[in-house]
Amino acid sequence: MEDIMMLCRKHTALTAMQQELLKRILVVFPFLADLSHARVRLYLLRRDKKSFVIASEAWPHTVYFTPDVTEEAVGSVVPAMEEPLLCRAMQTGKFSQGKREWNYGSMIDMMADPVFDGGAVLGVVCFETTSEDLSIEGYSRLLDAARLLLKNARKHLDPAMYQPLSASDGIVITDQFNRITFATMAATRIFRVLGVGNLVGGHLFDRKITQHIKKETQVTARPWEREIEIGTLVLLDRNLPIMEGGRLLCRIVIISDLTELREKDREIQVQSAVIQEIHHRVKNNLQTIASLLRLQARRSKSPDVKEALKESVNRILSIAVVHEFLSEQGHATINVKEIAEQIFNLVAMSMVGRDFDLQTKCEGATLILPSSYASSLGLVLNELVLNATEHGFEHRHAGRICLTTAEDARGYTLVFTDDGCGLPEDFDPVHARSLGVSIMRTLVEGDLGGTITYDAPPGGGTRVTITFPRKS
C-alpha cells in the first residue's frame, strides 16, 4: 500500500508542507473511526480536477460493518461525477451531509468535512456510517467531537493518546464547561455500577461520580491517563481535552474496564512466583545430586568410573544451570546465548585443567525461545563442549570454541565450532558408540524435531550444525 506522501506526489500538486499537514491528521484516523462509529476516508482531488484519489481509510472497531472489506481502497481513483457530496465540500469548503449508494442499491449515510490549509481546501474527510448508528441518541455530539478532533489534529499530536478503541470502551463527551453532553451505553453501564444513574447533563467532576474512588494511579509519561480503583472495579480513564487558543472546546473521556485484566495479571504474577520457586528447588536438588556423585567419584579407585561420574556431574549441572536461569529470570522464554555462556563457563571450571586456556565466544542473532527448549538445548550444548575438550583438545594447552546462532522463517540454526584436531576419518554419527553423540542425536531429533550434522570447517577443527523448527 502506498503511503500518503507517495500518493500526494503521484496524483496531486500539494506542497511538501501540505502533505506533512495531511500526514499529521492521519495519526488520529483509527481513533476517529472508532469514535464516530464510521468508516473514515481521506479523499484528495487529483490534478485533472475530474477525479478523487482515496489517500487513506480507517475502519471502526466499535461497530460491525457488513460490507466486504477485503478489497484495498487506498490508492483507488473515483470519478468526481460519481461523488457529488465530495465535490460540494471541495467547492464550498463547508460540511456536507447526505447519502450514497453502498452496494447493489443499499444506501449509507455520508458526511464530508473539508480539510483546510489557510483558505485552500486540501481534501475531504468523509465519515460513512449506517442509519442505525446515525440514529443513536446524541450522535450529533459524538460527530461534533470527532470533527473538532480532526481540526485539532493539525497540531503535532501524541499517537499514544489516540489509540484505537474497542466495543467495550465507554465514551463520554463534555462541552467547554465539562458538562457531559454524550455517553455511550458502555459508559452508562460502568457508572451505573457506581450508583450514577444518568450521566448526560451532569458535571464530569461532580462529587457523585468521583466519591467512590479509593485509589488513583497516574504515570508521569502519560498525564492524560490514570488507573482508578472504585470498589472492586479497576478502570482506565483516558482524558483527551480538545483545546484552541488555550480554551477548552470539549473533552473526550474514554473509560475502559480493566477489572478482569488486572485480576488475570495478579494470577499470572502468583503463578510466575510459584514456577520460579519450583525452578529454584529443582536446581538445588540437582546440585545436591551432583555433590553426591562427586563424593562417589572421589572414593572410587577406577579411573573409568571417576571419568564417567565426572561427566554425569557435568550433565546434571548443565540442567541445573537452565533451572537457575529460569528461576532468576522468571520468564517463559530463554536467551540461547546467555544459556550457552553459562554452560561454557561451567565446563571451563569443572572439566578443564587449570593450565588449559579455553577461549569461548557466542555470536549471531539473539534467539529468544520458549522455556520448553531449555533443558534439551542445555544438555546438547554441554555435550558439544565436553566432546571438544575431551577429544578435540587432547594433548593441547589451549583451544577455542564458538557458538553462532541464526533464525529464519523455517526455524533456528546453531553452529558450534572448535579449532581442535577434527573428526576421525571413520566417524559415523549414526553408529557412533559415544554416549555424548547418542545423547545429542536423541535430544535434537526426538525433543527438538531437528537435525544435527558434523563436518570440518575450512580452517580445521570440527563444526556441528543443529537446525530445528519453531514449535507451533
Image (tube, rainbow, N blue to C red):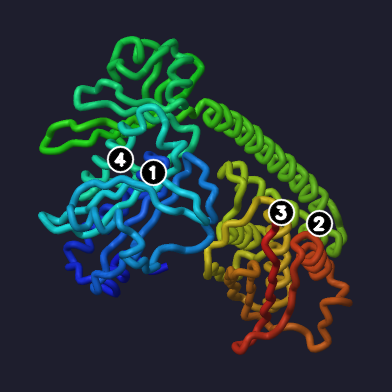
Instruction: Tell me, for residue 309, which label it has, or none.
Output: 2
Callout 2 touching callout 3 (CB < 8 Å): no
Q: Amino acid at mark 1?
A: Gln
Whole-Å distance between the Cαs marked 4 and 3? 54 Å
Residue 213: x percent and y percent? 39, 15
> How far separated are the C-alphas under marks 3 and 1?
41 Å
Quarter holding the N terminus is bottom left
Q: Is residue 168 above or below residue 179?
A: below
Element type at mark 3: helix
Q: Which residue is mark 1?
A: 163
Left or right: 236 in relation to 417: left
Q: Rounded to the nearest whole Å, what is the CA distance between mark 2 and mark 3?
A: 20 Å
- Asked whether residue 226 is in view, the answer is no
- The three-letter code of the residue at mark 2 reads Leu
Of residue 425 and residue 82, the one placed in the foreground of this image is 82
Q: Are marks 1 and 2 in contact (CB under 8 Å)?
A: no
3D distance between C-alphas at marks 4 and 2: 74 Å
Q: Residue at x 30, y 22 (%)?
A: 180
Which residue is the site of mark 4?
Answer: 146
**Front of the two marks 1 and 2:** 1
Quadrant of the frame with the C terminus: bottom right
Residue appearing at x 45%, y 45% in the figure: 60
> Residue 394: where, in percent of width, then height?
71, 77
> Would you identify the image quadrant in which residue 419 lies?
bottom right
Dot 2: what SS? helix
Q: What's the distance in space between the residues labelled 4 and 1, CA to CA?
A: 14 Å
**Camera-side mark, 4 or 2:** 4
Q: Name the residue type under label 3.
A: Ser
Name above or below for residue 217 compared with residue 43: above
- Using the image as rendered, state which of residue 57 and residue 450 is in the foreground: 57
Residue 18 placed where, x, y %?
Answer: 19, 62
